[in-house]
Image (cartoon, rainbow, N blue to C red):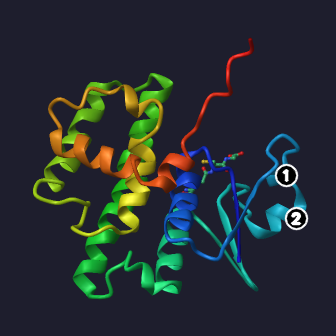
Amino acid sequence: MELIAFTITPNNRKVVAFIKHFNLPVDVRQVDFKRQEHKGPEFTALNPMQKVPVLVDGDFVLWESNAILTYLARKFPETKALPTDIQGRADVDRWLHWQSAHLMPMMGGVKTGDKTEEDLAPLLRVLNGQLEGRDYITGSLTVADFAVAAYTLTSNADKFDYTDFPNLAAWRKRMSSLPAFEETAYKLPPAAA
Ligand SMILES: N[C@@H](CCC(=O)N[C@@H](CS)C(=O)NCC(=O)O)C(=O)O
């Protein structure tokens, strides 16, 4: 199985971190953005959206990072990263959709300056409330934690003030200290001497 990715972006990092955390037998190959590989015919045949990540499992090709996360969690049930009961599964789905429908566009807006930290605060308050009395978003570690953490552990998100969101601050610390998130963090190249 192969994941074609560009690890430093959140939608890619969530999947790469998941693969690393559970040591899954998936080869990760970085897309060659410089050469515009993702716009070429070979890549477009895999993903007509011309975006990464893309998972190739034999004849089966899957794009959309959250779909890839749930596929991997079902393919490797030993991860216990996706509940099998109907309500537990729906709970995790809720947070995956929340990440892509609300958190991602808002974080994008804050990054470009179209939105402010004040606009973002209601979303962080919701997440902080959910984490009250919980170590992870739905209780135990699931794909939802990987999806949401990738967006709340960006270098931009590191700069926010979490004083009003102590549960979120503690969870961020918990997630960022997982070796898989440490390994996939964007590091600036060392300054030239
Ligand atoms: N909703 C998609 C978004 C994927 C996406 O936007 N990928 C970006 C990197 S994060 C990309 O490949 N951009 C290249 C481009 O648009 O040219 C997912 O979650 O997988």
Q: Residue 35, position in %: x, y?
A: 88, 44
At 27% from the left and 49% from the top, the residue drawn is 171
Q: Which residue is mark 2?
A: 42
Disc on res. 37: 1
Asked whether, in this view, residue 145 is left or right of residue 171, the answer is right
Q: Is residue 188 above or below residue 43?
A: above
Amino acid on which disc 2 is placed: Glu
Q: Are marks 2 and 1 in contact (CB under 8 Å)?
A: yes
Q: Nearer the viewer, residue 32 or 43?
A: 32
Ligand 1 is within 8 Å of the C-beta of the residue at disc 1: no
Is the residue marked by circle 1 packed among few (<14), some (14-19), or many (20+) residues within 10 Å?
some
Q: Residue at x 88, y 65 (%)?
A: 42
Quadrant in the picture for residue 41: bottom right
Q: Amino acid at mark 1?
A: Glu
Quick one: label 2, few (<14), some, or many (20+) residues within 10 Å? few
> Which is nearer the eye, 51 or 134?
134
Disc sitting over residue 184 in the figure = none
Q: Please say if 12 is above or below 173.
A: below
